[in-house]
Image (cartoon, rainbow, N blue to C red):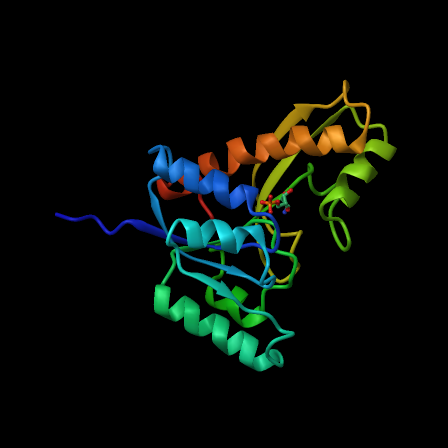
Amino acid sequence: MNVKRFRICVFASGRGSNLQAIIDGVEEGRLNCEIVFVMSNNSSSGALEIARKKNIPAYHLSEKVFHKNNFEESLIDLLEKHKPDLIVLAGYMKLVPISVIRRFENRIINIHPALLPKFGGKGMYGMNVHNAVFQAGEKVSGVTIHIVNENYDEGKIIYQEKIDISDCKSPEEIAEKVLKLEHKVYPEVIQKIIEGKIKLN
Ligand code: GRF
């Protein structure tokens, strides 16, 4: 009996190292799911390159290319076509349309490179986060995986893991340590969601 494999899609804007970590998890048997498509708002994103190399359907959708409603309609068409069980944001820098958030209530997750609710919210992405953590003199940082709701970084936290950064001499060193932790944690948490060990609603 062929059990329907859990389906995820990934939205990414940048180099795609979290996407790569998820693909590695699938290929190494640590993560039992199918990546049904990758979408990026950035036509030159590393994430689209990675997807293409792995023959994963890769789509560039951007509000710039369409005026707003075409973008939203195109995204909904993709979701209806590929029918993911879970939408995984991995460094996706655009807002997810409210219509998609409502259709995928409690089925969109995001990874944030700090211990929310601290160091989150508007403008807190990428190096801005690690600069703020460094400026604050924090000895510990970490990753947060949360549900994406209409308030974005304020969705229910489903997992957090801390890491000691007391030896870090720069925000770049913090970023490097936290990114490695992201690559370990994201595939693990997605697998726990698949196994029902982490509940999303
Ligand atoms: C990661 O630091 C993640 O926490 C944040 O955006 C970055 C994505 O990096 N949301 P990558 O594109 O997966 O390398």
Q: Count all numbered tags in the image, as a single digit.
A: 0
Question: Which of the 4 image quadrants contains residue 129?
Answer: top right
Question: Residue 96, relative to residue 23: is it above or below?
Answer: below
Q: Is residue 98 left or right of residue 24?
A: right
Camera-side residue of 171 and 140: 171
Q: Residue at coordinates 57% horizontally, 81% vertically from top-left?
A: 69
Quadrant of the image where one finds ligand 1: top right
Query: Is residue 47 shown to the viewer in this render?
Result: yes
Q: x%, y% of residue 119?
A: 76, 42
Q: x%, y% of residue 15?
A: 60, 48
Camera-side residue of 128 and 101: 128
View extreme (left): residue: 1
Q: Is residue 200 left or right of residue 126?
A: left
Query: Is residue 190 shown to the viewer in this render?
Result: no
Q: Residue at coordinates 62% horizontally, 62% vertically from top-left?
A: 150
Q: x%, y% of residue 189?
A: 47, 38
View extreme (top): residue: 167
Camera-side residue of 200 and 15: 15
Question: Which of the 4 image quadrants contains residue 52?
Answer: bottom left
Q: x%, y% of residue 29?
A: 33, 34
Q: Residue at coordinates 37% horizontally, 41% vertically from top-left?
A: 196
Question: Which of the 4 image quadrants contains residue 61?
Answer: bottom right
Q: Residue at coordinates 42% horizontally, 37% vertically from top-left?
A: 24
